[in-house]
Amino acid sequence: MTQLEITREAVRRPQNRRRKSCPFSGPNAPKIDYKDVKLLTRFTSERGKIVPSRISAVSAKKQRELSTAIKRARFLALMPYASV
């Protein structure tokens, strides 16, 4: 086995990993609301940044709704813009 083959094997991701499902899709999924600060803080980092959908497993449509709700809550001073 050459060095190139070894590095390619190391880079390969495990293929048996199950795809995460969107937490906002399903029959009893929570609604995205700017007033629900407890729910919105789950999707922000400890610094106050919005967590990307590849980490939080939120679908693209719901990620747009989520970011709008977080920005709206920040504007109304329900959530901080940044926590230092």
Image (cartoon, rainbow, N blue to C red):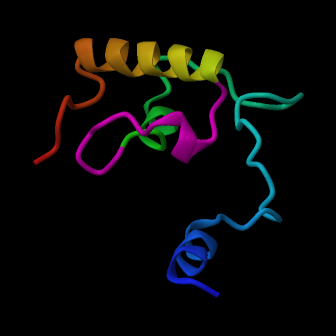
From the viewer's perspective, is residue 43 above or below residue 9?
Answer: above
From the viewer's perspective, is residue 61 above or below residue 55?
Answer: above
Task: Indicate the quadrant where residue 16 lies.
Answer: bottom right
- Asked whether, in this view, residue 3 is left or right of residue 60, the answer is left
- Asked whether, in this view, residue 45 is left or right of residue 9, the answer is left
- Quarter of the image containing the N terminus? bottom right
Q: Where is residue 21 in the image (x, y as percent from the top left)?
A: 77, 41
From the viewer's perspective, is residue 58 above or below residue 7?
Answer: above
Q: Position of residue 75 (x, y in %)?
A: 24, 12
Q: Mainly helix, strand or loop, the magenta region?
A: loop
Task: Indicate the quadrant where residue 33 lies.
Answer: top right
At 29% across and 51% down in the image, what residue appears? 46
Q: Where is residue 13 in the image (x, y as percent from the top left)?
A: 65, 64
Toward the left, the furthest residue is 84
Between 77 and 70, which is closer to the camera in this rendering? 70
- Asked whether, in this view, residue 51 is left or right of residue 31, the answer is left
Toward the bottom, the furthest residue is 1
- Asked whether, in this view, residue 67 is left or right of residue 1, the answer is left
Between 11 and 16, which is closer to the camera in this rendering? 11
Range of residues picked out in magenta: 45-59
Toward the right, the furthest residue is 27
Task: Indicate the quadrant where residue 80 lies.
Answer: top left
Q: Where is residue 84 in the image (x, y as percent from the top left)?
A: 10, 48
At 55% across and 23% down in the image, what residue appears? 63
Between 9 and 67, which is closer to the camera in this rendering? 9
At 33% across and 16% down in the image, what residue appears? 71
Magenta region includes residue 3: no
